Amino acid sequence: MQNKFEDLKTQAFLAIKVIKDSDELVALENKLLGRKNGELTNLMKSLKDLSADVKKTVGQLANEIKTEIEIGLDNKRRELRQAEWGTLIEKERLDITQPALPKKERGHFHPNTIIQKDLENLFISMGFMVLDGPELESDYYNFTALNIPETHPARDSQDTFYIKGHSNWLMRTHTSPMQVRAMQKYGVPLRTIVPGKCYRNEATDVRHEHTFYQMEGLVVDKGISFAHMKGVLEAVARHLYGQDTKVRLRPKFYPFVEPGVNGEVTCYLCKGSGCRLCKNTGWLEIFGAGLVHPSVLKEGNVDSKEYQGFAFGFGLTRLVMLKYGIDDIRLLESGNMKFLEQF
Ligand code: DAH
């Protein structure tokens, strides 16, 4: 009987030695000392069949062995834990002498997009929906539907890129073609803005570029007047340049509006007294606008006796240049990282 206990002890210590992790430790602990079927537990249970004095000596030995095994297991547990902490500490070690890792580049919006989103939010707050339109546009929507027939001289000032072999298709010269598209698709009443890319066949220089951005606006409803138009444009001007900004509207011919105006705001730099930015006029020209011409409403299937509307077109690119003091328009489409990283 004594031998059985001695053997069990030898086995137990051999097993403890090769334990690699705490799962194995718990398993061995159960195997040896488990209350129900632990090997040592069972062996101790069998003591009850022995005579009283043998029971006493063997029982004492059994208890000693049990304590030794428990201590052996505890030591192993401590050893394992220390090893685990060691790797944890190693993992969290901070090497303050390590050179800085290369900076992760973060992207950001293009200045055009910054201004576009800012104005979109303003117009959304006034109940406008934001529409997108095709950049490759038909002659009809770009010109004819906007009251610019084929022989009209206004076409000359908006020379653009035509598609070879498809003379009815061109790169849109403004966002205005979306006026008729929007009326045809959504009907009236209508309140929409259309930001987007436009194209013109320009000899490029610091102020002219073949690709630029505009933001069109169109409101059609019953009883719309010039006063509504002025109110909305003033809200935009104040949002862009502050509450004391004034708007000046002067007559200008655009075939798709009647009357048409050229819209200026007080120069935000000199507050109207005249400076380099506004070429000493005190005013910055930033949009064209007017009351929608009846023949444009007609193209949009809108009855001009019942409905009136106003439209406006902002030069988004111009707003960007004014805001950031960019003096060469070509930088905006250049993809030049040295330029773009400044925003
Ligand atoms: N489409 C015009 C341009 O590109 C700008 C414009 C003027 C738009 C008057 C309008 C408007 O909607 O009413 O020069």
Image: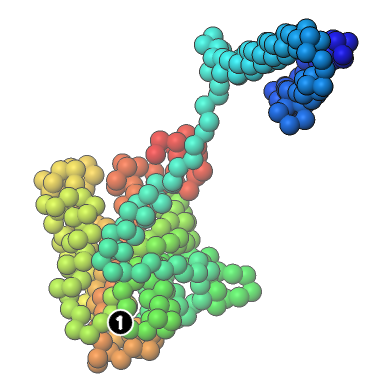
- Residue 111, image x and y in percent? 39, 46
- Residue 275, image x and y in percent? 18, 42
- Residue 137, image x and y in percent? 51, 72
- Write the residue at 38% across / 71% down: 176
Say whether mark 1 is within 8 Å of ligand 1: no
Q: Secondary structure at mark 1?
A: loop
Position of residue 341 relative to residue 126, above or below, is above
- Work out whether residue 45 can be spotted: yes
- Residue 296, image x and y in percent? 34, 83
Relative placement, left or right, of 88 versus 309 is right
Relative placement, left or right, of 321 versus 37 is left
As rendered, which of 4 and 169 lies closer to the eye?
A: 4
Position of residue 186 relative to residue 205, above or below, is below
- Work out whether residue 17 can be spotted: no
Relative placement, left or right, of 336 versus 192 is right
Q: Amino acid at mark 1?
A: Pro
- Write the residue at 81% across / 10% down: 54
Residue located beneath label 1 in the image: 189
- Write the residue at 85% across / 10% down: 2
As rendered, which of 53 and 136 lies closer to the eye?
A: 53
Q: Picture quarter containing residue 195?
A: bottom left
In the picture, the quarter occupied by the C terminus is top left
Identify the image's colour scheme: rainbow, by chain, secondary structure or one colour.
rainbow
Q: Picture quarter containing residue 42?
A: top right
As rendered, which of 280 and 170 lies closer to the eye?
A: 170
